[in-house]
Amino acid sequence: MIYSWILDSGGAGRGAWQGGVIYKFMRWCRENACFPSITMGASAGGYAAADVATGTEKTVMKGWTVWGKQALMKKAHPDVPGADRKTNRFRTNLRASVFYVMEEEEQEGVFDNEAHKKLMVFTTRVRRKDGKKFEGGDRFRYFLKSATRKFPKSLKYLPGGYIEDPVVFASNLPEKCESEYVRPLKRENYHAVIEASCLVPFAMGSPLLPEDVNAGLYETDRGSVFIDGGYTLKMPMVIFEEDPRFRELAHWARADKIVIFCCDPNGLLWENSSRMRSLNSRPSVVKALGENRLLIVHPDHQVEAGFLCTDNRKIMRTFHRGQEQGQRLLKSENVRRFFNN
């Protein structure tokens, strides 16, 4: 039985809830021979997917217990690509966390040459249609796009003049799947890709450039930047089913059962962070739920910590409440039926 986990985006706060839940699920699934061999996600979910791919819940705990602490900020690696560009405290904390959590031991767990283990981190490539450089005004427009994501459709800010492409970075990627939209995730670009997947422009400083993520430059990369994967891809079902650019990837990443750790409090599977379309009523999703091939896990309480939270005490309270929910779920009839049938 092949299991796949999709980890949703949600910022630091809902990411901490998600971390607590998956901590319990990782331990239980490893002990019960149903640990996922495929993990994927965008933003905080991309980071969480990388945690899961290390094979141990210790990685999850390692990250959240130091999140926001001053000792972590000293590990920000000022010599890495993009570190000289405009940033802020949250971004510095994020970069330090990625390097602190994903050290050599954790990377060994991801890049262990096991062909069945697949990690996919979603990013978004953005470039201006007029070919000009992506600069401060563009970053602010994309921040506004993110800030209005929860507004009614008529009030959302959806800036024109840009070309947005989802770009998936995958470990152990076969050459036949490679393209400008599906690129290898390797040790050389591992930290930068996770960082790029989490980057909301302006709110977290400057985006990363194609050379920063060691992406293998394409002509269409010229003038582009790499930012938060959620802008184009949170839930990959439609793209994997319909978009020919991802047909080979979808076939390669096929699983028997899928668990979605959804950060939306109502369990809504938003296609991307603009929240224009929820996929819950999509026939393939409804069918998978009915056939017990899909499990959706979402918060059953109000998540305390916010999107850009760096208060470690608040983060850890949020994490522990996620653990408590995870423990309850693993004792529930619905979850046990999913894993046992």
Image (tube, grey):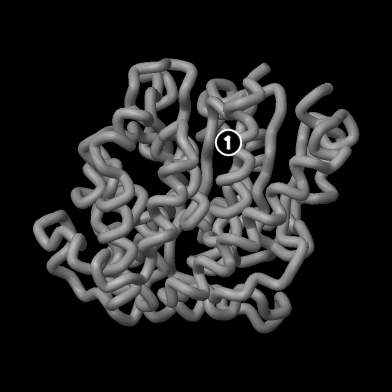
Residue sitting nearer the eye, 295 or 227? 295
Q: Which residue was labeled with disc 1? A: 27
Q: How many marks?
A: 1
Q: Amino acid at mark 1?
A: Arg
Q: Quadrant of residue 270?
A: bottom right
Q: Could you tell me which residue is drawn at 29 percent across and 77 percent down?
A: 89
Near mark 1 (Cα within 10 A), the count class, few <14, some 14-19 or many ≥20, is some
Q: Is residue 200 above or below residue 27?
A: below
Considering every residue shown, the one lying at the far left of the view is: 79
Instruction: Using residue 248 as the reference point, say whether residue 140 is left or right of it.
Output: left
On-image quarter of the N terminus:
top right
Whether residue 124 is visible to the viewer of this picture, yes or no, is yes
Q: Quadrant of residue 217?
A: top left
Whether residue 218 is visible to the viewer of this picture, yes or no, is no
Instruction: Using residue 286 as the reference point, say whether residue 64 is left or right of it.
Output: left
Q: Could you tell me which residue is drawn at 54 percent across and 79 percent down?
A: 147
On-image quarter of the C terminus:
top right
Instruction: Using residue 4 as the reference point, say whether residue 43 is left or right of it.
Output: left
Looking at the picture, how far across and down is residue 284, in whole percent? 80, 36
Looking at the picture, how far across and down is residue 88, in whole percent? 28, 77
Q: Could you tell me which residue is drawn at 63 percent across and 40 percent down?
A: 25
Q: Quadrant of residue 218?
A: top left
Looking at the picture, how far across and down is residue 301, in whole percent? 74, 68
Residue sitting nearer the eye, 85 or 71? 71
Local secondary structure at mark 1:
helix
Looking at the picture, how far across and down is residue 164, in whole percent? 45, 57
Q: Could you tell me which residue is drawn at 77 percent across and 46 percent down?
A: 329
